[in-house]
Image (tube, rainbow, N blue to C red):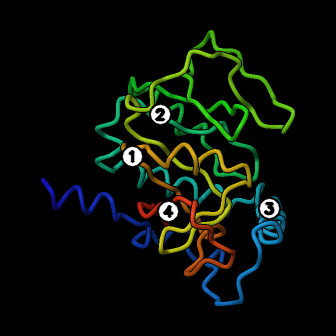
Amino acid sequence: DDSKDEESRNRIGSSIVCGCGFMQRNTEKSDRKNKKEFRKNQIQKLQKLSKTWEKKLDELNLYKELFKTTEWEKADNVAITLSEDFELDTFPIISTAQQQNKKVLVPKTLPNRMMEFVELTPDVKIVRTKFGVLEPESENYVNKENIDLIIVPGLAFAENGARLGFGGGFYDKYLSDYRGNKVALVDRSRYFQEPQWDVDSFDIYITNQIRI
């Protein structure tokens, strides 16, 4: 019913007590920095945390909360990135989706800040691009209207939905006319009460966040 859907959209991990004392949330207020400077500092911070048990524990708790949501349960097609070490590890989500017979779609970047999603199947070749990220070679793109849920990556998220991406603008452009469900998984190292970076008019807000 509508109340359950609303609860699912607003679900956060605050009820999880295991590991909650390991990392501090970014709750301090400060003058906003330009995106380039903040992005550089944030990546350095995330890289330092990439091999820690604290990060792994946050991820396990976020997975658990994601799999409870109505958006996940109803989704037949889930779009998600192939993560790098300092990002939230997406491979357990991909594995669970495949076990549940969901189609997994992964992004491929194109010129002019364009992006499309390709179904991840055993015969799809994955290569590392000149930017160092893993992407499919296939051009068998999935129509945007057929994507039920996009799990949106990011370096930082604010409580009001502001998102800091990697600087390419691919997701902002893709999501500008996307009408399906989208959600961000936000651990403590990526959560900010208020944006501490400049927010542009074209930035897409992700208000549906699962947080620890």
- Nearer to me, 158 or 11: 158
**Disc 4 and disc 1 in contact, CB within 8 angstroms:** no
Q: Nearer the viewer, mark 3 or mark 2?
A: 3
> Of tags 4 and 2, which is closer to the observer?
4
**Residue 57 image offset from top left, x and y in percent:** 60, 59
- Identify the mark at residue 67; answer none if there is no mark: 1
Point out the tag, 3 or 4, that comes first from the N-terminus. 3
Pointer 3 and pointer 1: residues touching (CB < 8 Å)?
A: no
Q: Which residue is mark 4?
A: 205
Three-letter code, disc 4: Tyr
Q: Is residue 79 above or below residue 67?
A: above
Residue at which label 3 appears: 43
Q: Label 3 sits on what residue type?
A: Ile
Q: Quick one: label 4 or label 2, which is nearer the N terminus?
A: 2
The crowding category of the residue bearing disc 2, from other C-alpha atoms within 10 Å (few below 14, some 14 to 19, many at least 20), is some
Which numbered dot is residue 164?
none
Q: Amino acid at mark 2?
A: Thr
Residue 96's disc number:
2
Per the image, label 1 sits on a secondary structure element best described as loop
Q: Secondary structure at mark 2?
A: helix
Mark 1 belongs to which amino acid? Phe
Q: Is residue 12 left or right of residue 135?
A: left
- Labels 1 and 2 touching (C-beta < 8 A): yes
Residue 124: image location, x then y, percent:
64, 14
Q: Residue at x 58, y 54 (%)?
A: 59
Residue at the spot x=61%, y=37% of the render? 91
Residue 152 is situated, as x and y percent measured from the top left of the image, at 54, 49
Secondary structure at numbered mark 4: loop
Vertical comparison of 100 with 28: above or below: above
Picture quadrant of residue 131: top right
Q: Is residue 6 above or below residue 76?
A: below
Mark 1 Cα within 10 Å, few/some/many (few <14, many 20+)? some
